[in-house]
Image (cartoon, rainbow, N blue to C red):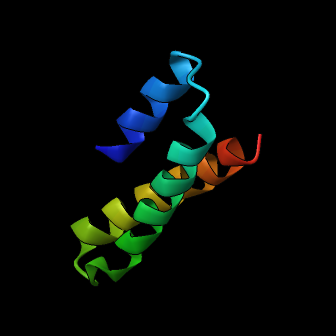
């Protein structure tokens, strides 16, 4: 999962963590297209929060 990869890059202090977090934000934003199923809406909400967090980390 891209979120775990971003976390790993940050925890290791990788110089590439901002780039990986930026990609993570892009991937997580694509979850909006998951549909209207209640379980998928819950997943999309989680992805949206992850995207927000990754976007902030990408600019840190």
| Image point (41%, 62%), residue name | 27
Residue 45 seen in render: no
Q: Is residue 56 left or right of residue 48?
A: right
Q: Is residue 51 left or right of residue 5?
A: right
Residue at the farthest front position: 15
Query: Looking at the image, which is closer to me, 56 or 48?
Result: 56
Q: Is residue 13 left or right of residue 40?
A: right
> So how many labels did they put on this image?
0
x, y (%) of residue 8? 43, 25
Q: What quarter of the picture does the N terminus occupy?
A: top left
**7 to 40, vertically: above or below:** above
- Residue 3's image quarter? top left
x, y (%) of residue 47? 43, 58
| Image point (62%, 56%), residue name | 52
Q: Is residue 41 left or right of residue 39?
A: right
**24 to 7, vertically: above or below:** below
């Amino acid at each position: 999962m891209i979120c775990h990869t971003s976390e790993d890059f940050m925890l290791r202090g990788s110089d590439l963590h901002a780039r990986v977090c930026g990609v993570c934000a892009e991937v997580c934003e694509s979850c909006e297209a998951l549909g209207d199923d209640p379980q998928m809406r819950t997943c999309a909400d989680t992805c949206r929060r992850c995207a927000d967090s990754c976007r902030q980390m990408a600019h840190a």
